[in-house]
Image (tube, helix red, strand yellow):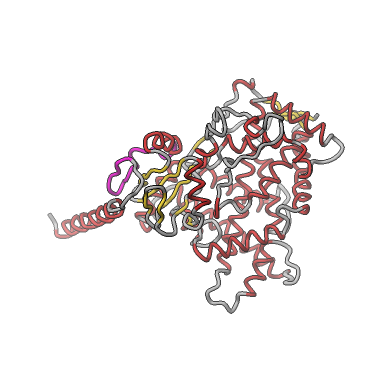
């Protein structure tokens, strides 16, 4: 063998051995970890788990190992919390300990450790507090944003009328409308639906959603944690995610430049203005968590989160109502009785519309948009039940296991608004309703999403009757499931003016 070839083989063996020993050390000697399937060094349980159907595998593993168990995605140790009791005990009872963001290597690279979603520690606390304060200041939960949602929904109604009884895919209509609501908060204004930059941004959001739900992304994420330098040169969905992140960043920095030119520090008009004022206040603080990168990333996360999740939920909700026209008809009756046709729905109506409120909650429960929750990590060693979870362990709080708990929701696989109604037909709250997660990492946009969902759905059903393009019994409402999220299958519908 040539000397150079022998040296190469020797180096490969050494590197492989080091990786093996590192992974084995991480997976062994872990004390009283929750039980789980036998894992192999380096690859963990990857051969036993299909990433696309990971939520289903989690159900099966829970049946064998109970409400808390351990799996390994590569060498990454993951403790899964399954069921209402253990999720509540961890995320709420031990909120500080379970407040870390879990490892998501590809998305962490895109975020560069900045922003609200992927940061940890003091940075996360300060940015989250700032975001919540200013989302409320600029209208979240207030009359001002309610009027903004109503205004944007008028544009949506006009677009729906212009379909003139023709079948169409509702995806873009819903995405544009809901995106403009969050745009008014973070950028200070809405976009025309034909604006080229807006169209580009929406296409990036939709592409990222598809990429995040791809099983290949999960595989690439695992490989990236081992070989970050090498993966930067290997084709795959991770490289497209990185490119899209740069596109978002460029757009936001353009808007930041425009805001700097028009900023009145005494009267900030939107989230970017407020952040710029904060930057000025923190200028002399060398340890400040507020800088241009955290501004860019926080703005991107608010925009993407406010654009994607609610529009997907509404799109799924319309599909479910196409499947069950009798449920849609009951919502029509309640809208006609409480609101009528002479005015727009408002948030004050919700307390008088228990059936509609129940339908909205059941849609969110049924679709379990993020079945495993966004990964967490424990910030220090935690004793949970009879087990010890080491600091830094990734946590999957399986939200679907709470939303589908048969003790709270009989026959959870069936769509039934009665899950949120008492024997008198009044709306019934449930501690098991956790589509936005729970504890200290609960979604910052929960209040806005709840308002949007109620106002947009009721206004659509106030003005239109939904009609499927196929027989209702042939409509498939099972999700396109992935490691990250659920989404409805593509479909078209008619909307008929009432």
Query: Viewed as shown, does residue 421 lie left or right of 338?
Result: left
Instruction: Decide whether the magenta segment is chiefly helix, strand or loop.
Output: loop
User: Which quarter of the rendering shows the C terminus?
Assistant: top right
Q: Position of residue 82 (x, y in %)?
A: 46, 41
Foreground pick, 384 / 298: 384
Up-down relation of residue 465 to residue 133 (above or below): above
Query: Viewed as shown, does residue 410 lie left or right of 30?
Result: right
Q: Is 49 covered by the magenta stretch?
A: yes
Residue range in magenta is 37-53
User: Which quarter of the rendering shows the N terminus?
Assistant: bottom left
Query: Viewed as shown, does residue 121 lie left or right of 140?
Result: left
Q: Position of residue 349 (x, y in %)?
A: 78, 41
Up-down relation of residue 498 to residue 114 (above or below): above
Q: Position of residue 174 (x, y in %)?
A: 68, 41
- Residue at position x 27%, y 48% in the image: 41
Foreground pick, 451 / 215: 451
Up-down relation of residue 120 to residue 90 (above or below): below
Q: Is 260 covered by the magenta stretch?
A: no
Image quarter of residue 430? top right
- Residue at position x 48%, y 55% in the image: 101
Residue 106 seen from this side: no
């Amino acid at each position: 063998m040539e000397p150079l070839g022998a040296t190469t083989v020797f180096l490969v063996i050494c590197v492989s051995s080091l990786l093996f020993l590192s992974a084995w050390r991480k997976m062994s000697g872990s004390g009283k970890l929750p039980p789980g399937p036998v894992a192999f060094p380096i690859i963990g349980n990857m051969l036993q788990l299909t990433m696309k159907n990971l939520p289903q595998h989690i159900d099966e593993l829970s049946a064998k190992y109970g409400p808390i168990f351990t799996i390994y995605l590569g060498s990454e140790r993951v403790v899964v919390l399954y069921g209402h009791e253990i999720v509540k005990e961890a995320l709420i009872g031990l909120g500080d300990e379970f407040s870390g963001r879990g490892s998501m290597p590809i998305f962490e690279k895109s975020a560069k450790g900045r922003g609200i979603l992927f940061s940890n520690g003091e940075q996360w606390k300060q940015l989250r507090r700032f975001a919540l304060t200013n989302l409320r200041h600029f209208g979240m939960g207030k009359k001002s944003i309610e009027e903004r949602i109503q205004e944007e929904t008028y544009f949506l109604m006009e677009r729906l009328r212009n379909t003139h009884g023709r079948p169409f895919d509702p995806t873009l209509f819903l995405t544009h409308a809901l995106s403009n609501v969050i745009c008014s908060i973070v950028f200070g204004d809405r976009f025309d639906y034909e604006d080229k930059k807006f169209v580009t941004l929406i296409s990036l959001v939709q592409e990222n959603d598809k990429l995040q739900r791809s099983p290949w992304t999960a595989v690439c994420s695992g490989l990236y944690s081992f070989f970050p330098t090498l993966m930067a040169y290997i084709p795959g969905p991770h490289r497209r995610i990185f490119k899209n992140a740069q596109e978002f960043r460029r757009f936001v920095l353009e808007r930041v430049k425009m805001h700097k030119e028009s900023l009145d520090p005494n009267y900030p008009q939107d989230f970017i203005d407020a952040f710029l004022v904060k930057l000025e206040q923190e200028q002399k603080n060398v340890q400040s968590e507020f800088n241009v990168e955290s501004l860019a990333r926080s703005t991107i996360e608010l925009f993407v989160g406010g654009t994607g999740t609610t529009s997907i939920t509404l799109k799924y909700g319309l599909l479910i109502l196409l499947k069950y026209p009798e449920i849609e008809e009951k919502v029509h009756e309640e809208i006609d009785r409480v609101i009528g046709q002479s005015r727009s729905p408002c948030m004050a109506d919700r307390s008088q519309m228990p059936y509609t409120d129940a339908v909205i909650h059941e849609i969110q429960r049924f679709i379990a948009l993020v079945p495993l929750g966004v990964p967490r990590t424990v910030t220090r060693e935690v004793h949970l039940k009879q087990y010890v979870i080491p600091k830094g362990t990734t946590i999957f709080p399986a939200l679907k296991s709470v939303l589908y708990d048969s003790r709270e929701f009989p026959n959870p696989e069936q769509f039934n608004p009665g899950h949120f109604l008492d024997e008198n037909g009044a709306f019934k709250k449930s501690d098991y309703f956790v589509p936005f997660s729970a504890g200290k990492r609960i979604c910052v946009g929960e209040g806005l999403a709840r308002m949007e969902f109620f106002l947009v759905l009721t206004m659509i059903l106030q003005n239109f009757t939904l009609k499927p393009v196929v027989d209702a019994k042939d409509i498939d409402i099972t999700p396109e499931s992935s490691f990250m999220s659920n989404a409805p299958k593509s479909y078209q519908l008619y909307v008929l003016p009432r």
